[in-house]
Each structure stands twice: as structure tokens, then as C-alpha cells.
């Protein structure tokens, strides 16, 4: 019923009298347009939901990376300013500075575990979606909101 009203209003704007064939053809076209709109809204809603669910975990991984990086930098500074570092062998120097050794091993372990991917996971998802959506003259921002681009004019 709503579609029939929309088609009648559309015909009135164009100063046409709606015929049963026009009502049928226009309602199919209108129905397809409404279905596309619903699909786009559902896709956008799901994408924003997915990106927003990644944000808390991404924030935690960023904090872990910052803390371990600061600990490693502090330990490296203490290791480098120690006068005994130049006099003893490399391994005994590391043995004398366990804070630096543990934080450095932890940082290396985090990178092997893939923290560099987890820190930027929402950006990776958004970039991949932009690549796919470019074929349909659309894009998305970093939060997952769709951006509709104007259609290119073919001459």
C-alpha cells in the first residue's frame, strides 16, 4: 500500500495519471530501490558494529605496546649509561641489567605474536572495505560509516 501511495505521488509530481501498468512497474522499481537502501543500511550498521567492537581491544593492545616500549627505552638508557657495560662481555652486561633484558624480550615476543597488526586492526578492516567499495562508487571512513560518491558521467 505504501508503495502504491509513493508511485501515485511520483506520478502527480510529473503530472501523469497512474495506470495499473505504471503502478506495477514503478512499484517494482521503488521496491528494488528500497531494498537496496535497506541492504546498504544493514551493511553500514554491521560494519560500524564490527569496527566499534574492535576499538576496546585495540586500545588495550596500544597501551600494552606503549608500556613495554617505554620500559624497553628506560632499560636501554640505563644499560647504555652504565660504565660497566663497556668493560664486560655482551651477555654478562645483559645479565647485569635484567629489566632491560626482560622488557626487550617481551617487546620482541609481542611483535612475533602480531601486536603490530592488532594495534591497527580497525584501520586494516576499513582499508580493505574501501578497496571493495571503490568498485561501487562508495567508500567508508575509519568508523565504518559509508560514503556515497557521485556516479561518474559517461559521455
Image (cartoon, rainbow, N blue to C red):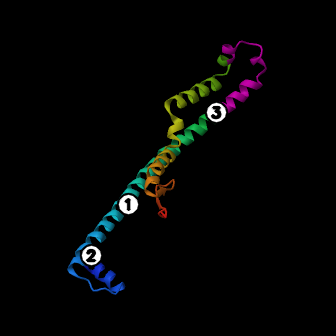
Q: Is residue 4 above or below residue 56?
A: below
Label 3 or label 2, whichever comes before in sequence order = 2
- Magenta span: predominant SS is helix
Residue placed at 27% from the left, 86% from the top? Answer: 17
Label 1 residue SS: helix
**Considering only order in the chain, which callout, 2 or 1, is on the residue closer to the N terminus?**
2
Q: Which residue position holds label 1? A: 40
Closer to us: 90 or 29: 29
- Of residues 37 and 13, which is closer to you in this image? 13
Q: Nearer the viewer, residue 112 or 105?
A: 112
Residue 135, how many percent across, how many down? 44, 53
Query: Is residue 1 at least partly visible in the picture?
Result: no
Q: Name the residue carrying label 3.
A: 71
Image marks 1 and 3: residues in contact by CB distance under 8 Å: no
- Provide residue 124's location: percent of width, then percent of height: 49, 44
Vertical arrangement, residue 153 with respect to residue 10, above or below = above
Q: Considering the image in quadrants, where does the N terminus appear?
A: bottom left
Residue at 29% across, 79% down:
7
Magenta segment boundaries in residue numbering? 71-93
Task: Answer with the quarter of the image where residue 77 lies.
Answer: top right
Left or right of 80? Residue 122 is: left
Q: Kindly identify which numbered label has been placed on residue 95.
A: none
Helix, strand or loop for disc 3: helix
**Label 2 secondary element:** helix
Residue nearer the viewer, 40 or 24: 24
Counting from the top left corner in percent of width and height, residue 37 is at: 36, 65
Q: Is residue 82 magenta?
A: yes
Label 1 or label 3, whichever comes before in sequence order: 1
Badge nearest the viewer, 3 or 2:
2
Q: Residue at x 72, y 24 (%)?
A: 79
Q: Which residue is mark 2?
A: 3
Distance between mark 1 and mark 3 Cα atoms: 46 Å
Amino acid at each position: 500500500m505504501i508503495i502504491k501511495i509513493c508511485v501515485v505521488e511520483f506520478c502527480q509530481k510529473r503530472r501523469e495519471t497512474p495506470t495499473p501498468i505504471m503502478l506495477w512497474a514503478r512499484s517494482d522499481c521503488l521496491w528494488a530501490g528500497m531494498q537496496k537502501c535497506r541492504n546498504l543500511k544493514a551493511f553500514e550498521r554491521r560494519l560500524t558494529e564490527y569496527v566499534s567492537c574492535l576499538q576496546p581491544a585495540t586500545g588495550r593492545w596500544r597501551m600494552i605496546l606503549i608500556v613495554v616500549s617505554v620500559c624497553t627505552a628506560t632499560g636501554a638508557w640505563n644499560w647504555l649509561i652504565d660504565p660497566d657495560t663497556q668493560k664486560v662481555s655482551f651477555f654478562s652486561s645483559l645479565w647485569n641489567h635484567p629489566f632491560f633484558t626482560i622488557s626487550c624480550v617481551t617487546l620482541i615476543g609481542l611483535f612475533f605474536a602480531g601486536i603490530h597488526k592488532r594495534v591497527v586492526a580497525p584501520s586494516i578492516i576499513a582499508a580493505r572495505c574501501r578497496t571493495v567499495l571503490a568498485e561501487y562508487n562508495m567508500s567508508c571512513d575509519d568508523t565504518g560509516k559509508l560514503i556515497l560518491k557521485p556516479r561518474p558521467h559517461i559521455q
